[in-house]
Image (spheres, grey):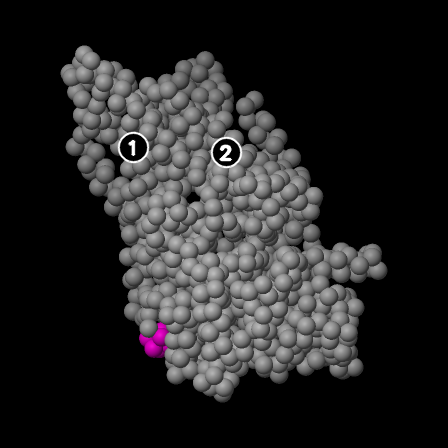
Amino acid sequence: MDQQRLTRILATATTHILLVLFAVFAVFPIWQIVNISLRPGDQLLSSTLELIPSNATLENYERLFTETEFLRWIGNSVFVAFAVTATGVVLASTAGYGFSRFRFTGRNFGLLTLLTTQMFPATMLLLPMYIMLITLGLINTFLGVIIVYSATALPFCIWTMKGYYDTIPVSLEEAARIDGCGRFQAFSRIILPLAAPALVITALFSFMTAWSEYIVAAQILQDSQLWTLPLGLKSFEASMSTQWGLYGSASLIVMVPVVLLFLALSRWLVSGLTLGSVKG
Amino acid sequence: MATLLPYAGLFLTGFLFLGCGIRDNNSSRIVIWHQMRPDEREILQRQLSRYALQHPSLEIVDIYKETEELRSGYVIASVSGQGPDLVYGPSDPVGVYAVTETIRPLEHLFPGTFLGEFDSSAFTFFRGHLYQIADKVGNHLALVYNRKYVQKPPETDEELLALGRQLLTRYGVKAGKPSVYPLTWNYTEPFFFIPFLTGFGGWVFREDGVTPNLDTPAMVEALNFIRDVRGKHKIVPGEADYEIADALFKDERAAMIINGDWSWAGYLQRGLDIGVAPLPKISRTGMWCAPMTSPKGYSMNINVPESKVPLILDLMRFLLSEENQLESVRILMTVPTRTSLYSHPDVTSNDILKNSLLQIHRGKPMPVVPEMRAVWDAMRPGYQAVMGGALSPEEAARQMQELALRKIRDMKE
Amino acid sequence: MEKRRLLITFFLAPSFVVLAGVVLYPFLYNVVLSFGNMNLTTIRHWDLIGFRQYVKIFTEPSQPDFYTVFWKTIVWTVVNVFFHVVLGVFLALLLNQKLRGKSIYRTILILPWAIPQYIVALTWRGMFNYEYGSLNIMINKYLGLPAVEWLKSPTEAFLACILTNVWLGFPFMMVIALGAMQSIPHELYEAAAIDGARWWHRIRMITLPLIRPIMVPAITLGTIWTFNNLNIVWLVSNAGEPADNTHILVSFVYKAAFNFYGYSYAAALSMVIFVILLLFSLAFLRTTRATEAAF
């Protein structure tokens, strides 16, 4: 009996040690960013490791808000990210349902095609997309980036939604329909609320895509008034002289909302990510 | 249905809002793309807001883009009928812009009297047309030294090595690294290697200006030289990109740095007691190490409608004016392009500017042909491999040449 | 039946339209482009020239060499996905038990996923710095070992990219695995416990086989994403340094198109990548489905 207890304590201790090690590994680079953002002037480079730099200052944060258009970029990013999230949720929740509940010709092909959209190097889609957006007059508009981002996150989101719907018994809807609900009502009243965890994932994914994308934004948004956060951040970086302090502090502020979202949603994250299998 | 309504609402309001972002190419709005560093940007923005005060009906927007992004982004945008009105940068992409027919010739847009006020180095011609007018020349490397460690800058390579050894012994070595590195520069960009190549009598192109000339004895000697400086004499750090070299010098952990005119003002602002000297002479050849020089200036997008051209020309005249060039001279210590400024007391009384002018004199203009891009890309692997100890100079020189030829062929195919 | 068709259209058409515009049209454009000769000099008037670009990819020397880059991409993908899955499943196993502070650990371990990739890449690049990078400071000052020239030699630089990408990718797999493990009914473990099965035995006989159907699509997707991850390689190695030795296929494509204006060449190369991934996915899904039947 004692032997068994000892093994159990040892096992728990090992588990904790391992988890702490990995936690340190996970946090280390983040701590680096905090550290950089607190350093005075442009002293990105220091050859000591201190938890907090000895001459820590908040001047970078102050400069960020007083000397740059940071607030405007935040506003733009928030707007774009929310629009993309809303679009993504609407599109993925409906399309995922269609794939989960209907059997039709081309269904399997459609699902596979969704997967194949991830296989082509995305950067090569830029050039034709750019030409197309010019033709449509969407260059230098938020609508341009919103459409592109929604589509970028969409295949994954549809898969997630479809996988989750698959786990919801069809009998639930059937019961509702016997009660006189239409198919659409059954979807919106019964299924959608049940699929909340997957909706959360879809929302989170769409949000993240929009919040942190750089390459497409750089092509489409050419006006600094329309810049999103990644573009603003990039402008602190010049080929020969990077403003590291601003960069670090801005990075941290960009990270915070996403990290908070993850923290708030981490419970849902675990239950909602069911990619499902192709054949399902 | 109830569940979907809020989404639909959000969706629709979103679309309504988007209207705000849409702008057509109206003529009261002038856009400039540039790749200026933050300190240059500040000056430009000040100048633009002064101009805007005089022209309240105009909206002038300046947008920073990183070098590579500016180049490819501008070509794609302009080919698709878009892009900024003016594009500002060093002269080297002018060839690419001209070949892709994305900028327009300027020689007939300005009267000869106006152009006559500039030094000839201000103009970038390509295949007989004037495509760019510069407000500064330079972008050149020179030897910057910290007076705390160096009283008299070296004038030859031998003096440089001797000074290096002296500094090493004076400040000692800690944990395998010198406390103060005698010299440093950027090992990743071949631009920083050009002075050594020219010092040993080499150049990137043959006489015709488009055929690469990299597999030469001069190249091998120059590569050998820098390899020894790092490996044998150990007077430079083991690894240095631009950021490291710059930080080492700023932290006073390097006594000398090879860096461009863009960096000097920053060193002074930091309170370093620096001097700028022309790069040394290579004793064996008797030739000065010559950096590349290039003008930085404005080119006009081919898509600017005729009706808008006068507006743009007026803005260009303003940005190229004496007063505005002088502002850059004072703050950034760059060399102006208006001849009248060369005798201005602010230029002649400044030691750094005087030496800078001397260095430009000894420098060679950077070629603007598109082939230059291929040569940079062909030199980079070899240069980095030699500095990293992975290739012999002979092999590197051979590979550079072969690669340059292939890249040029690929470019045209 | 009419009504059913209408419903299907209602559910699927909006997504289809968006994807057709943003993905399908550009894709088809690229197919055409890959048979053309668009480059710096022909950008305003390019023609279709057939298979020339494909021939060039496979038969003519390039810098860096296509086959070398191809194998490097395979190594990159296999190593990354391997560590993502192994670390992810391992951590999920640790977290999937009664443990004090479990949710705190889980939250912290998800963090790498939450940070935008370009910030991750540039931060790690700073950490790999020879002189000032925190990794070398640790190695040199605290462990007393010689500092590593992370970004100056091909192998170390490639290793640096991999390390960065492993850091950023394991939380995704961990979350998927954790979700899968939580859906395993408790009764199964209880039954096994009664049978006296040891911890490792239970994992091997119950957990791993049961999370498999969920891990397979995740691994497929993870492989595709890793294969095509431009950000990390491009930003950590600063566009392929040293000497274009750290490229994987996508970064090679990016360089060919946007640095050298070889649009048609890059389009053809993209098609090659597309076909490679398509064949892989089909084969992978098929073999795993075939073995699935054996359970």
Question: Residue B400: x percent and y percent?
Answer: 39, 74
Q: Amino acid at mark 1?
A: Phe
Q: Amino acid at mark 2?
A: Val
* Residue positioned 34% across, 59% down in the render: C154
Look at the image and tell me in which quarter the C terminus of chain C lies: top left
Q: Please determine whether, in this image, residue B171 is positioned above or below residue A11.
A: below
Query: Which residue position holds label 1?
Result: C90
Taken as a whole, is the magenta stretch helix, strand or loop?
helix
Disc 2: host chain: A
Question: Residue C134: x percent and y percent?
Answer: 43, 47
| Image-quadrant location for residue A26 | top left
Q: Residues within 10 Å of mark 1 (few under 14, many from 20)?
A: some
The Cα atoms of the two marked residues, 2 and 1, are separated by: 23 Å
* Residue C86 shown left or right of residue B138 in the figure: left
Question: Residue A272: x percent and y percent?
Answer: 41, 28
Please give the range of residues in magenta.
Answer: B393-398
> SS at mark 1?
helix
In magenta segment, residue B141: no
Query: Which residue position holds label 2?
Result: A259
Q: Please determine whether, in this image, residue A238 is positioned above or below residue A197.
A: below
* Residue positioned 58% across, 73% down in the render: B152
| Viewer-nearest residue: B281 or C261 | B281
Q: Are marks 2 and 1 in contact (CB under 8 Å)?
A: no
| Image-quadrant location for residue A197 | top left
